[in-house]
Image: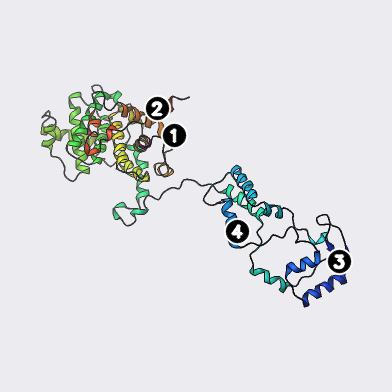
């Protein structure tokens, strides 16, 4: 037997004939020894560089903790992964040095070495060698592919046992509302056809009706339907100035009949108008309004979208009150008729969140259920911020006075989200 030099290991001893190889194999078969002893006798030097000392499970966990790898729960960029790789080499320098040489193939030696298979089975009970360098490459690729996005919350999961929530049909209902809201919208320029009424008179009427609605302690749906009936009627029927208040009273009467359980009587409406109209005039206007609107009062208002979007925003009472404060300010303004009811509702909630949090916030869940992105809401939201700033000034302060009471949590005193207006001014 002679020494044959090799590029990777010049001290490696190799058999020079086949007989020597067979004899060596037979010797192993009759005299079974540990694999490490065989390598030591055969080579005459330390174990081959590719062989890594097997470690216990506790040592593995210690090394993994030092690396702080978590490819599933922690998104890591390529730069950060490279930092982790260099950090692991600093923690385990000996392991890194051992793993760099690759295992040479049997063709490099020319001859083969026969090792008993049964002898090798004993090593299966021991921990498998860890090839750290290969593991790091796989982990880096996996961590680069993982992109954690904001999840869309199932807002109806908690109401599966509530029959009034109609979880099975709620998505279809709101899809229907979304398709039908365009028919409930009126032209934002319908006041041009009115000869004796303008948008300022409309604002005075609605601001007064908001106070009447609060005095009668009516439901929220009633107020929004009242405003919808007024706008739809005025867009189709010319009205004299002295009859405008009567239109508002009759619209509220019809909305109460549609939404309320306990409806105010006609005499109460006459008293609240300071007896400006008779019972006969109220009934005649009611008949005219129903015929003009073809008895159709089932169009979706911003209220139905408000309740759904507030649920998507996982709102508390403070956010709910501020959202309704903002959208009621928008009801008074004639220029807000250019926005659809669902957009008004989404913008009110978005503006309220910005006011309470002090920064822009519109979650993926809100975007999914409202079908509006943050950019689509900004125009309407900035207008609402302007109304919020001026709510306590001027002649039309009915909404501000309403939300300055303890009943509504003094919501009107909340600071407006002025930074939304500053964003608009930047180029």
In magenta stretch: residue 354:
yes
In the depicted structure, whether residue 155 falls above or below residue 293: below
Quadrant of res 409: top left
Residue 373 in the image: state x and y as whole percent: 43, 38
Front of the two marks 1 and 2: 2
Sequence-first tag of 1 and 3: 3
380 vs 404, left or right, is right
Image quarter in which the N terminus is found:
bottom right
Is residue 198 among the parts visible in the rendering?
Answer: no
Circle 4 residue:
60
> Are dots 4 and 1 in contact, CB under 8 Å?
no
Label ID, residue 375: 1
Query: Crowding at label 4, few (<14), some or many (≥20) Cα neighbours within 10 Å?
Result: few
Front of the two marks 3 and 4: 4
Sequence-first tag of 2 and 3: 3
Q: Residue at x 82, y 72 (%)?
A: 24
Quadrant of res 248: top left
Circle 3 residue:
15
Q: Specify start and end residues of the magenta stretch as a single range.
A: 353-360
Residue 302 in the image: state x and y as whole percent: 31, 38
């Amino acid at each position: 037997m002679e020494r044959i030099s090799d590029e990777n290991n010049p001290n490696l001893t190799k058999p020079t004939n086949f007989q020597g190889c067979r004899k060596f194999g037979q010797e192993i078969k009759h005299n079974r020894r540990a694999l490490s002893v065989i390598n030591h006798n055969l080579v005459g030097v330390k174990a081959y560089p590719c062989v890594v000392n097997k470690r216990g499970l506790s040592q593995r966990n210690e090394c993994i903790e030092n690396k702080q790898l978590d490819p599933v729960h922690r998104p890591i960029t390529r730069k950060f992964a490279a930092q982790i790789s260099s950090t692991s080499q600093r923690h385990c320098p000996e392991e890194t040095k051992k793993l760099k040489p690759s295992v040479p193939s049997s063709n490099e030696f020319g001859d083969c070495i026969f090792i008993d298979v049964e002898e090798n089975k004993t090593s299966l009970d021991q921990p498998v060698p860890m090839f750290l360098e290969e593991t790091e490459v796989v982990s880096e690729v996996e961590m680069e592919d993982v992109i954690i996005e904001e999840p869309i919350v199932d807002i109806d999961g908690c109401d599966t046992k509530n029959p009034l929530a109609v979880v099975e049909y709620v998505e279809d209902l709101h899809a229907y509302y979304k398709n039908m809201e365009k028919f409930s919208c009126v032209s934002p320029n319908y006041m041009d056809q009115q000869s004796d009424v303008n948008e300022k008179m409309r604002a005075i009427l609605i601001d007064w009706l908001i106070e009447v609605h609060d005095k009668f302690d009516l439901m929220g749906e009633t107020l929004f339907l009242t405003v919808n009936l007024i706008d739809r009627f005025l867009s189709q029927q010319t009205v004299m100035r002295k009859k405008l208040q009567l239109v508002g009273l009759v619209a509220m009467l019809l909305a109460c009949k549609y939404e309320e359980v306990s409806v105010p009587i006609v005499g109460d409406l006459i008293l609240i108008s300071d007896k400006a109209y008779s019972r006969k005039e109220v009934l005649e206007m009611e008949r005219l309004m129903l015929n003009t609107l073809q008895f159709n009062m089932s169009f979706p208002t911003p209220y139905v979208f408000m309740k759904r979007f507030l649920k998507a925003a996982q709102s508390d009472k403070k956010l709910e009150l501020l959202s309704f404060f903002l959208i009621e300010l928008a009801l008074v303004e004639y220029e807000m008729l250019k926005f659809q009811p669902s957009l008004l509702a989404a913008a009110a909630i978005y503006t309220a969140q910005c006011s309470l949090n002090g920064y822009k916030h519109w979650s993926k869940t809100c975007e999914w259920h409202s079908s509006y992105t943050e950019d689509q809401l900004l125009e309407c939201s900035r207008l609402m911020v302007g109304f919020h700033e001026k709510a306590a000034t001027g002649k039309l302060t009915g909404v501000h006075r309403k939300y300055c009471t303890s009943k509504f949590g003094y919501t009107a005193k909340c600071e407006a989200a002025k930074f939304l207006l500053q964003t608009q001014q930047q180029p």
